[in-house]
Image: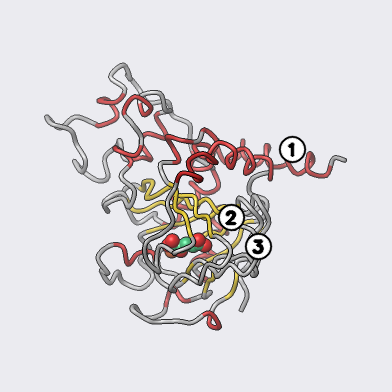
Amino acid sequence: MSIRHLPVSTSADDIAAALAEDGAAIVDALAPASTMDRAAAELQPYVEATRIGRDDFAGRSTRRTGGLIARSQTCRGLVMNPLALATAKKVLSHGAAFQVHLTQVITIGPGAEMQPIHRDQWVFDFFKFPKGFEVQLNTIWAMTDFTEQNGATRVIPKSHLFDDGLKFEEKDTEPAEMTKGSALFYTGSIYHGGGANRSVSVRCGINLTYSLAWLRQEENQYLSVPLAVAETLPVELLRLMGYSYGGYALGYVDDVRDPIKVVKPDLTKARTTTLADAESRFREQAKQWRGEDKAP
Ligand SMILES: O=C(O)CCC(=O)C(=O)O
Ligand SMILES: [Fe+2]
């Protein structure tokens, strides 16, 4: 079966329902192509300076460039995308909170082989989480078009309910083909991997993932984003990065202080923008983008 494509007007509840069924779905045109071009321009010097991967999993023709919250204003917006956050909230609703797990541009160069098919949640020391108990909601945003030829992410729809520890080949998978600005949403339990790049150009995706806040983050946000930068960031983003409790008393600072008050000592009361407010503002914006996209 092929991967479901959903329009940007889809509600977070419906995206979460598609993920519960298939483990993966593409939200088309989640951001305008121009936003992805802006992110690419901000990140270009860092991507160029990134070394290629050192093993088959990291990819010997693939660059992984992180620290995106520190390095790209545009990526801060993508991390906070209301539809992605509302979907993460729904998919991870059995936890007290969720957090940023990693931020990474994945640049797959021409000639790259397919990444071994895996579950992202294997990073947690291969712990066998119960079937249906999701610990991660992942997104990969197309910064270039994703095609079968250039290394679109390979996915096995519905494999989130398969047994653990299975091995797969390319023929068992489907390419997540999508246009620049679209995003593949997938759970930590879905079997997938970066595609082989049989084209002459690079395939770039921005991988932004979220996990239950009681798990260790894959990318260390406290060191990837210097404190001097963190101090300038909005409270909602800081909380997502882990400057918050991941459960009762989980993540406190010294004398049981809330980490957000350590980064923002002047903070008296956190601004309260509800997710629902943010999501409805996003929908208004998305309508405008679609109009703009049609303009000559
Ligand atoms: O680059 C991709 O399309 C997916 C990469 C991936 O699955 C990973 O690095 O865990
Ligand atoms: Fe992965």
Count residues near mark 1 (Cα–Cα under 10 Å), then give few for <14, some for 14-19, many for 20+: few
Name the residue located 36 percent from the left edge and 53 percent from the top edge. Answer: 211
Identify the secondary structure beneath mark 1: helix
Q: Tell me if the residue at label 3 has its CB under 8 Å from ligand 1.
A: no
What's the residue type where badge 2 is placed? Answer: Ala
- List x then y, in percent, for residue 153: 55, 66
Residue 205 placement (x, y as % from top left): 55, 54
Q: Residues within 10 Å of mark 3 (few under 14, many from 20)?
A: few
Report if the CB atoms under discs 3 and 2 are less than 8 Å apart. no
Three-letter residue code for mark 3: Val
> On screen, 60 above or below 167?
above
Q: Please tell me whether mark 1 or mark 2 is closer to you in this view.
A: 2
Relative height, residue 53 to residue 111 (above, below): above
Q: CA distance from mark 1 to mark 2?
A: 19 Å
Q: Which residue is mark 3?
A: 200
- Can residue 186 be seen by looking at this rendering? no
Ligand 2 is in which quadrant of the figure?
bottom left
Looking at the image, can residue 150 be seen? yes
Could you say whether the residue bearing mark 2 is in a helix, strand or loop?
A: strand
Camera-side residue: 117 or 25? Answer: 117
Which quarter shows the N terminus? Answer: bottom right
Residue 139: x %, y % from top left = 50, 55
Q: Amino acid at mark 1?
A: Gln
Question: Hey, which residue is sitting farthest left in the picture?
Answer: 255
The residue pinned by badge 1 equals 288
Q: Mark 3 or mark 1: which comes first in sequence? A: 3
**Ligand 1: does it lie within 8 Å of the C-beta at label 1?**
no
**Mark 3 → mark 2, Cα distance in angstroms:** 23 Å
Q: CA distance from mark 3 to mark 1?
A: 34 Å
- Residue 242: name its quadrant: top left
